[in-house]
Amino acid sequence: MDSLSLAFSSGWASGVNSYLVVLVLGIAERVGGFAEVPDVLGRWEVLGLAGLMYAMEFVADKIPVIDSTWDVISTAIRPTVGAVLGVLVAGEAGSLPEAVGGVVGGGTALLSHLVKAGGRLAINSSPEPVTNIAASIAEDVAVLGVVWFAIEHPRTAAAVAAVLLVVGLVLLWFALRLVRRGWRRWRGRGSPPAVTGATGP
């Protein structure tokens, strides 16, 4: 149950920032030697690659439009990382828990990725960069907090991740409705007024 909870939490976090998840788990394994964290994540080459990719995402994620482009590129990457992490933390190779962990991690990562990408599209409807920077920092803090907490309290962290996922889906639904409504109004203003036919005497 704990491994499934960790798969869910890391899956949610991977959908938001997969490289930060790998980096946090790898550092935890390297420093603390936690049994729940797979040894492979603590390898120096894994940490180096995760750190490099996180540095690139840290910059790209805070620039309007560039962040959405990065999200499109990450559509295949984040769910894949979530699934791989789910498999790694689930246990023995070829086991049913491993398969379930992969499905849970990948599925949760896909949902949270869609929430992040959709939210950024809504935010990018405003040209100022402050909102993007604030959203990116908030996401990184949430990922860091959930993953680090999940290492020692996986079930509680999974509950927190589930709440964040549901809230994100609800907010995304409302945000997309507002953006669609604003788009329709903008198109309506740009259309020429209807010409009424002249009535005879």
Image (cartoon, grey):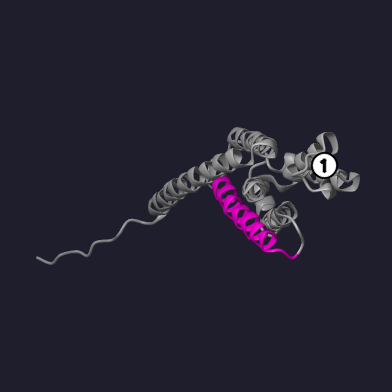
Residue 61: x and y in percent read 68, 42
Residue lying furthest left in this view?
Answer: 201
User: Is 119 above or below relative to 94?
Assistant: above
Image quadrant holding the C terminus, namely bottom left
Q: Main secondary structure of the magenta part?
A: helix
Residue 193 sits above or below residue 22 on the image: below
Look at 72% across and 57% down and name the residue there: 87
Left or right: residue 46 versus residue 21 is: right
Query: Position of 195 compared to 8: left or right?
Result: left
Q: Which picture quadrant has residue 162? A: top right
> At x 80% / y 46%, what residue is drawn?
53
Given residues 12 and 193, the one toward you in this image is: 12
Q: Residue furthest right?
A: 44
Closer to the camera, 119 or 85? 85
**Residue segment shown in magenta:** 94-121
x and y, in percent, of residue 99 in the image: 67, 63
Which residue does the numbered mark 1 point to in the structure image? 51
Residue closer to the observer: 194 or 162 = 162
Q: Which secondary structure lies at badge 1?
A: helix
Place of residue 178 in the rendered image (x, y in percent of width and height, measured from the top left): 42, 46
| Residue depicted at 40% across the width and 53% down the height | 184
The image quarter in which residue 159 lies: top right
Amino acid identity at mark 1:
Gly
From the viewer's perspective, is 116 left or right of 180? Answer: right
Q: Is residue 106 magenta?
A: yes
Say whether residue 8 is left or right of residue 43: left
Magenta span includes 61:
no
